[in-house]
Amino acid sequence: MTVTPLGIPRRLLEFTIDGEEARVPEGSTILDACRADGKDIPTLCQGDTLTPKNACRVCVVEVEGSRTLVPACSRKAEPGMEVRTDTERARHSRKIVLELLASSVDLSTTPQVAGWIKEYEAKPDRFGPDAARLDEEPKIDNDLYVRDYDKCILCYKCVDACGDQWQNTFAISVTGRGFDARIAVEHDAPLTDSACVYCGNCIEVCPTGALSFKSEFDLRAAGTWDESAQTETTTVCAYCGVGCNLTLHVQDNEIVKVTSPHDNPVTHGNLCIKGRFGYQHVQNRG
Amino acid sequence: MDLRFGDSKPTDGERAAVDALLGPPESSWEGADRDEMRAADLRWARGGHAARDRRDQLLPGLHAINDRIGWISEGALDYLCRRLTVPPAEAYGVATFYAMFSVTPRPATVLHVCTDLACTAAGASELCAGIESRLGPGSGVSVQRGPCLGLCERAPAALAIKAGDPVRTAVSAPATVHRAVLAASAPDSAPEEPSAAMAVPQAGDPSLTLLRRVGVVDPASLDDYPAHGGYTALRRAFELGPAGVIREATDSGLVGRGGAAFPTGRKWQATASQPDHPHYLVCNADESEPGTFKDRVLMEGDPYALVEAMTIAGYATGAHRGHLYLRGEYPRAFRRMRHALEQARARGLLGDDVLGQGYAFDIEIRRGAGAYICGEETALFNSIEGHRGEPRSKPPFPVEKGLFGKPTVENNVETLVNVLPILTMGAPAYAAIGTERSTGPKLFCVSGSVERPGIYELPFGATLGELLALAGVRAGLRAVLLGGAAGGFVRPDELDIPLTFEGTREAGTTLGSGVVMAFDDTVPLPRLLLRIAEFFRDESCGQCVPCRVGTVRQEEALHRIVDRTGAAAADDITLLREVGRAMRDASICGLGQTAWNAVESAIDRLGAYE
């Protein structure tokens, strides 16, 4: 049985979204309120297990009285606030953000983004064939996971998951500045020369597939990765007594990826190297 | 925190540089030599806050290594991380954030040559080409083209930094190829920089308020400063008490001079009333807006005024520690301020008991390392704290959670220095200067196509034309840039714009930090606009998408249309407008929000590309 902590009862506050009354518990973000209301706002750098860095700016909405647009993912709702999610101004910024990202980053494995590009009528090609791209080659320096920074939108989620928000390993950081900023370990060394403990919690939170299991990377390269043919089975990790839930992603009777449910009270989506990558014995058919 | 360090060892020089800042290591766990393994090492442990609370020494540590060696090696960075309990990956992220640091080997001497607006108009391109042909590979000097060095009154400018113990610097401005090469090859024998007063064409004029001591007092002497009215304002502050000082600041109508024009009294009141303690005072002396050099001149010419003003601000807001975040490219201002602080401490004007009034206050200088973004108030906090200088999202505002997460008041140098006349002449007399909504005197940094470039002090309300006449504007004026790269252009027929916050706003432009840059036809306008776009592309911290990629797309578009006009440029101008609008609306901080302002004004007001 899952025990859900109820916490201290929170006061409800009232404000309006797109002219309609909304009531949310104190401390909720505008995004929480919108989602509770059934409104969809695109998000990239927001993650359900992390404090958002609000760096991607694709979730911006208009708030009455605010000079600039505000990020729905991190701005707390305030009593009497008047939020408008679907104005021309907000849609324009979202469209441009999508165009800027799609013209510089490989978004081919980012879920939902193709739909948003269509919805917002974004045209990433408009910047011309010479528009600067990240132009990064995949970094394959270990047997467990691949860092393909050509797909990195610099959402900071892997850095936060590796750092003080979850793992406290601090193996990676944003380095450089501006368009040249990249995620890297110290001295841009291979992962094997870093503090990385291969928990894979960065892969869990990566929104674009820049970080992926080596198994997934190889199958994609071979053109045989097929999510529709995969099953997902949630089980309990057999390694120690903590009781982490593992979700085994299986394709053609082979485990191709291991995740953990984000709402699991033990893991919140996090695992260690054994739970995440130590599954080979299961399929050792000798 | 269980940190992993690599196997690289620091050289003796690198170790000495870090130890000079932090003291010798206490144990081999902190990087002391293993052969000296002492029995105490076996029982040595340091963790928790005691180990991590020195993170703010990371930036000074990087400076120490870079100053001594010229670049930051793996071994040096690892040693610094060990000493401060900082993850090497994060320290690497910080070191690679700043333009003045290098994590790859380079010659001990770096010659920074300004290629920004005023210097470009004064021939920086030819200068650079000349210098680069003389100082090629093997010359022992690395030539770096870079953003504004804050020496616009003496454009074109170059700054040589020669690593060593101590680090040597030499400024060459106005620079010729010969003089710049000389400064880089022998910084010690380079001619002394002209005094700060040379940047103040009005120097000695008795009607001046903020600049009255520049060129009159000896900036090195703490005896001369009180002889010219110094420390009367601080005495007055102690008579009034903190609440009284805030009331005077509020009644004076003083607003921030850094560009945002926020009422200073209100900011002080909001900080003073925070129940959380300690409170901090931060003076933002990271003026990096191209064309701005007023804070440099104030600090070089009248350093004790800033010490006194910071003490008053600290007293009013209940802070006992002040941080002066000083631009890394200002070696002389750094030396003058450091000397002034030492003198003030020795005389009891800083320390546990300022002027015997029972108020404890001290000031620490933190040097920036080449990042325009660190002039943004919250990025500056991150920089001091030893993190990457990326802006934080607001709210919470600094008055509530600022430096080290505590209530913080942050003011620009010029803003603080205004507090002195407010207290000595009284708020009503101060408020009578200028206009009703922009009170007091204002400093303007005039450069470009004028006979007498420099800092001018005028009461708010003088017109742009009056200021330019004072500076001796040359014939053939094509455009005036107000407020720097984040500001806006105006036409030569708009010289009747009153130089007030409300006047410039009504005219659809901005006063910004007080930059007034005059341009004639020597450099084609599209080239200047491209330089502005390059500036923002280089200086974007990269945190948010609209600014990180938007500045790149804008620079690409401006590059495409640099020689085009009319219909041939129309598509790219539409693109610039659309991207610019999203940058203004959706960027996290003021850098991205204003990056497109100057180019937009050039298109709309000056008819660039028509």
Image (cartoon, rainbow, N blue to C red):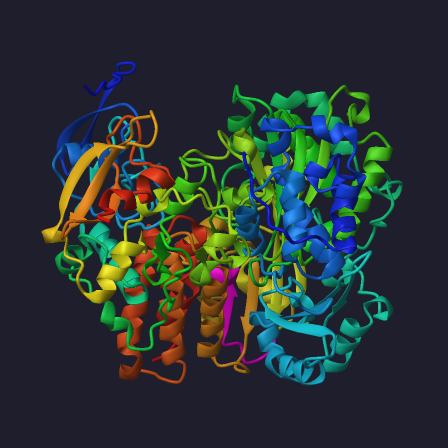
Magenta span contains residue B481: yes
Q: Is residue A254 above or below residue B520?
A: above
Nearer to me, A177 or A250: A250
Residue name at image x 85 percent, y 39 percent = B343
Identity of the residue furthest to the top in this view: A8
Left or right, A13 with reference to B363: left
Q: Is residue B142 above or below residue B198?
A: below
Q: Is residue B410 above or below residue A109?
A: above
Q: Which residues are magenta?
A: B473-486
Nearer to me, B544 or B207: B544
What quarter of the picture does the N terminus of chain B occupy?
top right
Residue name at image x 81 percent, y 26 percent = B355
Residue B321 in view, yes or no: yes
Q: Is residue B198 above or below residue B81?
A: below
Left or right, B456 with reference to B542: right
Residue name at image x 45 percent, y 72 percent = B529
Magenta span contains residue B94: no
Q: Position of residue A6 (x, y in %)?
A: 25, 16
Residue name at image x 64 percent, y 62 percent = B150
Q: Position of residue B590 (x, y in %)?
A: 44, 51
Residue B205 in view, yes or no: no
